[in-house]
Image (tube, rainbow, N blue to C red):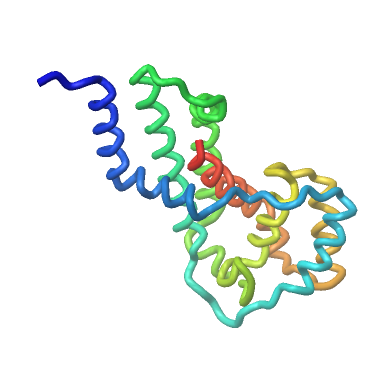
């Protein structure tokens, strides 16, 4: 019986779709859109900081540390995408420019993940004030500030806009010293989170 190449490729694709890592990537692509909201100017970010500060409500007590778990999950998804792209190249299939960028820069992504893990010791984020409400409920308030920065900056961090945003936020609600210190690491975590969401769609 003669079997066409297309039939074999189809069967391989279906088998690959059943792999646990690939189903996780597929689920991420379907349920977690990239962090992308309306692009704000520095002045708009300043106003948004005041609005966000008025919306944030803090919970009492400590909660479990979810950021390290999420970082590990993000790493798993990114590795899975990298492996699928590598398989595609071995099979002489073309990949998108975004896929090429991911493969070319994956060593930098791994470096950022290692840095994030090193600067976020186990239990550290449990000491930070956590949100009681909104999409980031249960997560550190400063992490939500980082997510908003990424969302309204088209995935980039503009130092001037960030400074205005945080300063405006604090005209309504003061951040704790530990939160201000944590802003760089939270931005790194937010960027990795966004990269995971974008990569799952490659």
Q: Position of residue 151 (x, y in %)?
A: 69, 51
Total numbered labels: 0
Which residue is depicted at the point 51% across and 40% down? 201
Vertical arrangement, residue 184 with respect to residue 7, above or below = below
Closest to the observer, 94 or 10: 10
Name which quarter of the figure residue 76 lies in. Answer: top left
Answer left or right for 47 relative to 109: right
For the point 45% across and 45% down, the residue is 75
Image quadrant containing the N terminus:
top left
User: Height in image: 91 above or below 140?
Assistant: above
The residue at the point 48 percent across, 47 percent down is 29
Q: Residue furthest right?
A: 43
- Residue at 43 percent across and 33 percent down: it is 82
Residue in the foreground of this view, choosing between 202 and 151: 202
| Image x and y of residue 135, in percent | 60, 67
Question: In the orientation shown, which residue stands out farthest toward the front?
Answer: 1
Query: Residue 8 location, x and y as percent?
Result: 23, 26
Q: Which residue lies furthest to the left in this view?
A: 1
Residue 54 as seen in the image, left or right of residue 31? right
Using residue 41 as the reference point, say whether residue 154 is left or right of it.
left
Query: In this view of the protein, which residue sits in the foreground, 154 or 46?
Result: 154
Q: Nearer the viewer, residue 118 or 14?
A: 14
Where residue 60 appears, as percent x and y from the top left, is: 60, 82
Q: In this view, does 79 lie above or below 97?
A: below
């Amino acid at each position: 019986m003669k079997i066409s190449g297309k039939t074999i490729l189809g069967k391989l694709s279906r088998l690959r779709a059943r792999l646990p890592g690939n189903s996780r990537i597929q689920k991420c692509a379907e349920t977690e859109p990239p962090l992308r909201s309306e692009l704000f100017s520095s002045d708009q970010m300043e106003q948004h900081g005041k609005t966000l500060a008025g919306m944030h409500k803090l919970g009492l007590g400590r909660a479990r540390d979810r950021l390290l778990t999420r970082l590990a999950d993000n790493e798993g998804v990114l590795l899975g995408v990298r492996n699928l792209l590598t398989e595609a190249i071995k099979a002489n299939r073309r990949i998108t420019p975004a896929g090429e960028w991911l493969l070319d820069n994956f060593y930098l992504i791994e470096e950022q993940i290692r840095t994030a893990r090193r600067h976020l010791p186990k239990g550290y984020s449990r000491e930070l004030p956590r949100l009681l409400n909104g999409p980031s409920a249960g997560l550190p308030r400063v992490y939500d500030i980082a997510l908003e920065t990424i969302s309204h900056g088209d995935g980039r961090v503009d130092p001037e806009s960030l400074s205005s945003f945080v300063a405006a936020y604090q005209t309504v609600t003061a951040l704790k010293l530990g939160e201000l210190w944590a802003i760089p690491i939270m931005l790194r975590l937010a960027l990795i989170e966004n990269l995971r969401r974008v990569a799952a769609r490659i």
